[in-house]
Amino acid sequence: MEEKVSFISDGLKLSGTISVPDGLEAGEKRPAFIVLHGFGSTQKAGNVLAPCALLNRLGYVAMRFDMRGCGESEGERGKLICLEQVSDTRNALTLLQSKSYIDAARVGVMGSSFGAAVAVYAAGLDERFAACISASGWGDGAKKFRRQHSEPGAYEKFLKMLDDGRAYRERTGKSMMVSRYDIVPIPQKLRGHVVEKSIMDMPVETAQSMYDFRAEEMIGKISPRPALLLHSAVDSVTPTEQTISMFERSKAPCEMHLFSGTDHFMFAERNQRVHEVVTAWLGAFFPVSGPAVMADAH
């Protein structure tokens, strides 16, 4: 069963969907996850729909929504400010916890790529989140961009774009618009994962916000709640070292898994090994029913 929902985040109306697993009985309360979409994407992306379907099959309620400025939600189109997305995620949690069929003390957050960084930050900031799953995420925006723009002169060009954007706003009072691929390069072979209605042109403030964002400073604050960090061993979009660095800063119970044979959009690729790892981790650390197995070390 799916329920279309909306909620208010900092005065903006955001659009979402709650999917309820089969077999939910009257009066029963289930644990849940909020699943966040990636960079300028929507709640209909494969990296959102696939994990929501997996969670439902395993017995969890799943919520997905369009961040402000994305999809069907209100907000300035393409202005993706990291801390504002953290606020949207926390407000989504408030809505989900109000549902009678939700175990309000057992709601986790999960995201891919940009959504993974937001998920880690939100979970570290807000103790209401009971668990966190990060897939293909990043923890240090500046270091991420340096590796993403690795061709000779590319990083200098990126930094100049940020400088030009600040100068443009000072001169005109308006935002300078740039292509999403000038912010985050994506190889042509993977661009099919950029779904319809994704944002293609964005104000340069989006890039500046990502550059300044450091989710890795929040990863250690998730403990003693469980966290799972996933990344492709070779990622064509977000450097794998970003997740490794976050894991090094984490505290128990936290697990990290690197996967060969998949790329940045690991859930959209429906990689069976990824689904098996997530399923096993949920059973150990965040089961639908029964006590979790809490590890003493990473």
Image (tube, rainbow, N blue to C red):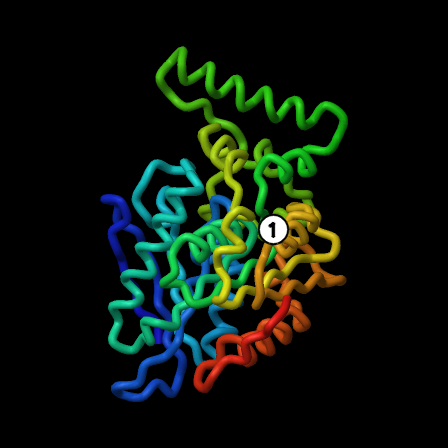
Residue at x-position 38% and y-position 65%: 63
The residue lying at 43 percent from left, 39 percent from top is 80
Residue at the top extreme, as displayed: 171
Q: Which SS class for mark 1?
A: helix
Residue 112 x, y percent position in the rendering: 54, 55
The quadrant of the image that shows the C terminus is bottom right
Horizontal and vertical percent for residue 161?
A: 56, 22
Residue 44 seen in the current view: yes
Residue 270: give x, y in percent of width and height: 62, 67
Rendered location of residue 260, percent (x, y): 76, 62
Residue 58 visible somewhere in the drawing: no
Q: Quadrant of residue 127?
A: bottom left
Seen at 68% across and 33% down, the residue is 149
**Callout count:** 1
Give the labeled residue for mark 1.
192
How many residues crowd around disc 1 within 10 Å: few (fewer than 14), some, or many (20 or more)?
few
Vertical arrangement, residue 4 with respect to residue 7, above or below: below
Q: Is residue 180 left or right of residue 289?
A: right
Viewer-proximal residue among 27 and 254? 254
Q: Amino acid at mark 1?
A: Gly
Q: Residue furthest front?
A: 296
Q: Nearer the viewer, residue 245 or 281?
A: 245
The quadrant of the image that shows the N terminus is: bottom left
- Considering only vertical position in the picture, is 133 above or below 154? below
